[in-house]
Amino acid sequence: MIVEDDLILNLLYESYLERLGFETEGELVYGKTAIETAKNLNPDLIIMDISLEGEIDGIDAMLEIRKFSDVPVIYITGNSDPYHVNRAEETGYIDYLSKPIEFDDLKMAVKAYFRDDVI
């Protein structure tokens, strides 16, 4: 599941995940929509931006998702300041990547969590 309010980046991350063998649910730009979609889909992985459209950011969305799911999350964000990093740590992320990222950055983050035969 990809939650990114920049459509171009959303499509880029979708192509990266598909290259890694994942089916994706993308074009999610609101934290509230991400929460509902995670409830309905039970995804294997969430790629989450922190700055999202709407009332709640990606970290708050993940805190809500954590109430019903232990799904792994990788943050890909331009917010790498200590405030955001510390808030994100509350969600138990598997990686925190700063934009811009390359395919290999995401591949390494995914490989660190999933078994080698998954990707």
Image: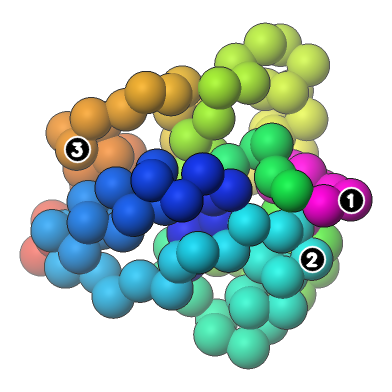
Q: Secondary structure at mark 3?
A: helix
| Image mark for residue 103 | 3
Label 1 belongs to which residue? 55
Q: Residue furthest bottom?
A: 40
- Disc nearest the viewer among 3 and 1: 1
Along the polypeptide, which appears first: circle 2 or circle 1? 2
Q: Residue furthest top?
A: 81
Cα–Cα span, label 3 and label 2: 28 Å
Viewer-proximal residue among 73 and 101: 101
Q: Secondary structure at mark 1?
A: loop
**Residue visible at 60% across and 16% down in the picture:** 80
Viewer-proximal residue among 72 and 23: 23
Relative to 43, say whether 110 is above or below.
Answer: above
In which quadrant of the rendered view does residue 69 lie? bottom right
Q: Secondary structure at mark 2?
A: helix
Relative to 22, say whether 4 is above or below.
Answer: above
Cα–Cα span, label 3 and label 1: 30 Å
**Residue visible at 22% across and 51% down in the picture:** 16
Relative to 32, say whether 104 is above or below.
Answer: above
Quick check: 5 left or right of 67?
left
> Which stretch did the figure color magenta?
54-61
- Tell me where residue 2 appears, x and y as whole percent: 47, 59
Label 2 belongs to which residue? 32
Residues marked 3 and 1 touching at CB (< 8 Å): no
- Tell me where residue 109 appears, x and y as whole percent: 32, 39
- Tell me where residue 60 appears, x and y as whole percent: 81, 48
Q: Residues within 10 Å of mark 2 (few under 14, many from 20)?
A: many
Along the polypeptide, which appears first: circle 3 or circle 2? 2
Tell me if residue 56 is in the magenta stretch: yes
Viewer-proximal residue among 89 and 54: 54
